[in-house]
């Protein structure tokens, strides 16, 4: 196979295949799974923008929650179309990301500290949602008021009853997310940030504006996650503080991205597919009654991944592929 | 007592020692001299088994050291005073000394050995509750040597005892080493300060870029052209 | 105005009692981080397992309560050592964040195992302890016992670290890991002992919590994050800082919950935390150097 076909051609073929998925006549449930794969793939990719550069956040549930609850509350309490709720949620997300990011990066808070501070953040958002139970419905969750009583879709309310429509919406966002990844990857910022990830003081001494760069990536990452939250809320038409905010979902994001491989563009998506497939396989094989087995296996796999495959499924696969294609190195002399 | 034959060692892909053979007999004081980066510290770390030897044999009183785990070396009677003292800064002087006597055999004799160390170094007794990090350079050196003595060793490894110390303090430190000799301790000293160390040691090895270039009695080495030109500026 | 003062005082007292438990939680976490340089994200889940252990030993197998407590502490202690040996040790050489994340995997694992083994219904130890009346205030006896036990535990750990050879070695290894073998100390053995001690403290916390709260596989999520915050607030790895921060944080929760609704107490405490992070990101008292 010539390089052109295998490198340029394959992604386009894959994309065409993806675009044809809903037209294949698959049932609603498999289509729902496909939508979830792409949606969470998008969210995990957003997280991995930060994770791959050493900024491991355990708090992205905060941004997801702000997006999800932002549009639902805006619609239910103020009649605000999600098209308006979205920019408001984005603005709030940006503010929060800045408020946490700036002091952390300014004072060189990294590693464990950063992870734990962001963990606090996601918990704050979750607790506020629960505490405001009169407005948000608390732990019982909330549903956006339906605009689909008499019609199959409403653009103003961003609600569609057809899963096919949602598939294409989510597919587009997922592709947009990959494009963002590529842009960040190719910019000078990425090289600078990798330098920072390894030796922050040295990077700073060469004039790389550490704080500004970190903030920029953090903002992009947070905003992407917020959009993911909005999409999730509008698609599922149900939100709940546990599923869109808090430490639980934050950790899931982290592990999804890592399991797939957060250093590679398609890695987080692979992680999303893997996680969803795992849950489905277990559900089918064991029936709905076995609570906890999926979590157990998930946890066990994650431990094994970090110990044996820290680059994730896709990362390890790519490494194996590259090693197989490289000619055997000549033995070192001397 | 201590014998190295054909020992090679390094870090990762970098080889620091090539085919080292040396010997320290009971009761002797032997010096290893040489410039920065020659591998002197590496040599002591191999003996202490902080590093794996890649080739060669190491024996202490006839027992093979090559495969002994690092934390068991002290049980063979070898005590190592690391470069830059490496005291535990936030532990008190007495706790540092206590760490030197961690092994069960040493714990049994803790009280008498502590008293002995305090006799040698009265200043340590004065400062025994102070965090070791607050001591002056010379005091830290005393504490580090005292810590090594707490295990009742047969062989003392000293890594650059004069490093970072003012000349007057260096004199005092080597005076202490002389006292140790007088009490019967066998000593292997790695040093850059050639004048001082050759006054204390009977024999010396010259280590340059990982190899032993010269070997002989201190008097011989002091008189040799190579040493005088390169290291004593004469 | 009198009644107002008494209730407020009661909130303060309850805050102090809560602080005792939080301090115990923080102590275990700070010990592990200060010595081994790893954060056990699954710490609360270890406690959850301990709570189930006490429940089963006492309620299902009929052991006397004190024996069930001992069993719980022993079990979690062993779990702690096992966690280090099999999960953390393999990644000690890798990036530090991997060590944190691998314990996150254990978090899910423990939750899942607990769900499988014990189901999702809330379980209760069934031990009813009285409520004491002190003046005009009501103080839960269970809370008081928990506070005293936590205090005793902390004093015990303090004495152990200061006075014993092992304790001194544990303090030493956190200051200079590399030269420990020169003292005849096997670093991994010290890490295992420290992990067992951290697990034991978690087991003690489990005993104290099971007296007051129902057990559920996911309860770790309700007090785990708080424990981490307290540690970071006091300076990660700083055992004394964590101790003090625990009481400050508990006061915010208790008094804040008194002035507003209960949950707002937590929200206020969290916001206080974020504000402190903004001002002193290394914690109120600075991390271990």
Image: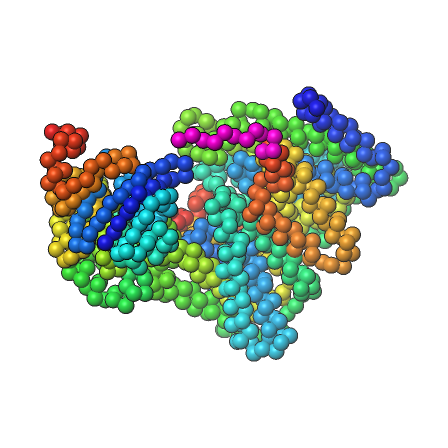
The answer to which of B198 and C225 lies nearer the viewer is B198
Question: Residue A102 at what x, y percent from top left?
Answer: 50, 36
Q: Which residue is drawn at 23% across and 35% down?
A: B213
Q: In the rendered view, tell whether residue C62 sits above or below residue C9.
A: below
**Is residue C244 in view?**
no
Which stretch appears magenta? A323-334
Prevailing secondary structure class for the magenta stretch in the rendered image: loop
Q: In the rendered view, tell whether residue A112 sits above or below residue B60.
A: above
Spot the residue most to the right: A150
- Relative horizontal placement of residue C19, taking residue C162 as reference (left or right): right
Magenta stretch encompasses residue A210: no
**Is residue B164 in view?**
yes
Q: Which residue is drawn at 85% across and 39% down?
A: A26
- Relative horizontal placement of residue A51, taking residue C117 as reference (left or right): left
The answer to which of B177 and A306 lies nearer the viewer is B177
The answer to which of B72 and A40 lies nearer the viewer is B72
Question: Residue A85 at what x, y percent from top left?
Answer: 70, 36
**Residue B41 quadrant:** top left
Question: Residue B128 at what x, y percent from top left?
Answer: 23, 58
Q: How many marks?
A: 0
Q: Residue at x 31, y 38 (%)?
A: B18
Q: Which colour scheme is used?
A: rainbow
**Residue A28 quadrant:** top right
Magenta stretch encompasses residue A331: yes
Question: Residue C279 at what x, y percent from top left?
Answer: 45, 42
Q: Which residue is drawn at 69% across and 57% down?
A: A292
**Residue A92 quadrant:** top right
């Amino acid at each position: 196979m010539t390089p052109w076909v295998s490198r340029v051609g394959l992604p386009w073929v894959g994309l065409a295949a993806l675009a044809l998925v809903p037209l294949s006549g698959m049932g609603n449930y498999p289509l729902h799974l496909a939508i979830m794969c792409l949606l969470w793939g998008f969210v995990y990719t957003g997280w991995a923008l930060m994770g791959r550069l050493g900024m491991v956040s355990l708090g992205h549930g905060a941004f997801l929650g702000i997006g999800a609850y932002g549009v639902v509350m805006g619609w239910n309490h103020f009649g605000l179309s999600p098209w308006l709720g979205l920019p408001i949620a984005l603005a709030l997300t940006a503010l929060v990301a800045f408020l946490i990011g700036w002091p952390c990066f300014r004072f060189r808070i990294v590693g464990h500290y950063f992870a734990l501070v962001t963990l606090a953040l996601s918990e704050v958002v979750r607790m506020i949602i629960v505490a405001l139970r009169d407005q948000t419905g608390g732990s019982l969750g909330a549903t956006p008021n339906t605009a689909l009583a008499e019609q199959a879709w409403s653009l103003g309310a961003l609600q569609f009853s057809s899963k096919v429509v949602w598939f294409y919406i989510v597919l587009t966002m997922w592709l947009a997310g990959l494009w963002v990844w590529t842009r960040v990857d190719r910019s000078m910022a990425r090289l600078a940030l990798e330098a920072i990830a390894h030796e922050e003081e040295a990077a700073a001494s060469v004039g790389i504006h550490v704080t500004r760069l970190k903030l920029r990536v953090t903002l992009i990452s947070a905003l992407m996650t917020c959009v993911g939250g909005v999409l999730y809320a509008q698609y599922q038409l149900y939100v709940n503080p546990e599923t869109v905010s808090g430490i639980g979902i934050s950790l899931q994001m982290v592990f999804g991205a890592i399991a797939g491989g957060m250093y590679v563009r398609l890695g987080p998506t692979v992680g999303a597919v893997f996680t969803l497939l795992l849950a489905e396989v277990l559900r089918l094989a064991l029936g709905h009654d076995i609570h906890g087995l999926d979590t157990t296996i998930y946890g066990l796999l994650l431990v094994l991944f970090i110990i044996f495959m820290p680059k994730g499924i896709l990362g390890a696969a790519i490494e194996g592929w590259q090693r197989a294609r490289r000619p055997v190195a000549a033995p070192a002399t001397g | 007592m201590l014998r190295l034959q054909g020992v090679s060692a390094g870090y990762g892909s970098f080889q620091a020692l090539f085919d080292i053979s040396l010997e320290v007999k009971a009761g002797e004081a032997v010096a290893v001299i040489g410039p920065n980066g020659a591998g002197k510290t590496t040599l002591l770390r191999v003996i202490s088994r902080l590093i794996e030897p890649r080739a060669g044999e190491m024996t202490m009183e006839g027992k093979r050291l090559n495969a002994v785990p690092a934390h068991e070396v002290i049980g063979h009677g070898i005590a190592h005073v690391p470069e830059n003292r490496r005291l535990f800064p936030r532990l008190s002087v007495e706790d540092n000394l206590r760490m030197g006597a961690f092994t069960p055999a040493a714990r049994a004799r803790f009280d008498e050995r502590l008293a002995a160390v305090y006799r040698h170094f009265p200043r340590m007794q004065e400062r025994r509750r102070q965090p070791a990090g607050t001591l002056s350079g010379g005091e830290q050196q005393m504490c580090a040597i005292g810590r090594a003595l707490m295990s009742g060793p047969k062989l003392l490894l000293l890594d650059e005892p004069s490093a970072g110390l003012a000349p007057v303090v260096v004199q005092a430190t080597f005076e202490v080493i002389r006292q140790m000799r007088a009490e019967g301790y066998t000593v292997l000293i790695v040093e850059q300060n050639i004048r001082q160390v050759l006054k204390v040691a009977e024999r010396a090895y010259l280590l340059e870029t990982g190899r032993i270039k010269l070997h002989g009695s201190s008097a011989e080495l002091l008189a040799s052209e190579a040493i005088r030109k390169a290291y004593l500026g004469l | 105005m009198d009644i107002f003062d008494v209730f407020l005082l009661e909130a303060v007292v309850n805050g102090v009692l809560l602080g005792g438990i939080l301090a115990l939680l923080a102590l275990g976490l700070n010990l592990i981080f200060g010595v081994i340089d790893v954060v056990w994200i699954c710490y609360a889940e270890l406690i959850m397992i301990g709570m189930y252990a006490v429940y089963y030993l006492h309620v299902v197998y009929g052991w006397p309560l004190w024996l069930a407590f001992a069993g719980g502490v022993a079990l979690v202690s062993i779990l702690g050592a096992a966690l280090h040996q099999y999960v953390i040790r393999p990644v000690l050489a890798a990036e530090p964040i991997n060590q944190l994340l691998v314990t996150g995997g254990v978090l899910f694992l423990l939750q899942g195992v607990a769900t499988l083994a014990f189901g999702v219904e809330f379980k209760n130890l069934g031990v009813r302890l009285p409520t004491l009346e002190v003046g005009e205030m009501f103080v839960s006896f269970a809370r008081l016992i928990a506070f005293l036990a936590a205090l005793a535990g902390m004093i015990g750990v303090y004495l152990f670290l200061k006075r014993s050879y092992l304790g001194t070695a544990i303090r030493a290894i956190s200051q200079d890991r590399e030269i420990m073998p020169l003292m005849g100390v096997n670093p991994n053995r010290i890490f295992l002992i420290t992990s067992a001690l951290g697990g034991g403290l978690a087991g003690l916390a489990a005993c104290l919590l099971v007296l007051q709260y129902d057990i559920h596989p996911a309860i770790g999520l309700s007090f785990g994050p708080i424990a981490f915050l307290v540690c970071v607030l006091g300076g990660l790895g700083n055992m004394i800082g964590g101790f003090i921060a625990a009481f400050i944080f508990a006061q915010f929760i208790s008094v804040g919950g008194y002035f507003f609704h209960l949950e707002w107490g937590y929200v206020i405490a969290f916001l206080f935390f974020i504000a402190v992070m903004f001002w002193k990101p290394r914690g109120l008292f600075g991390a271990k150097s």
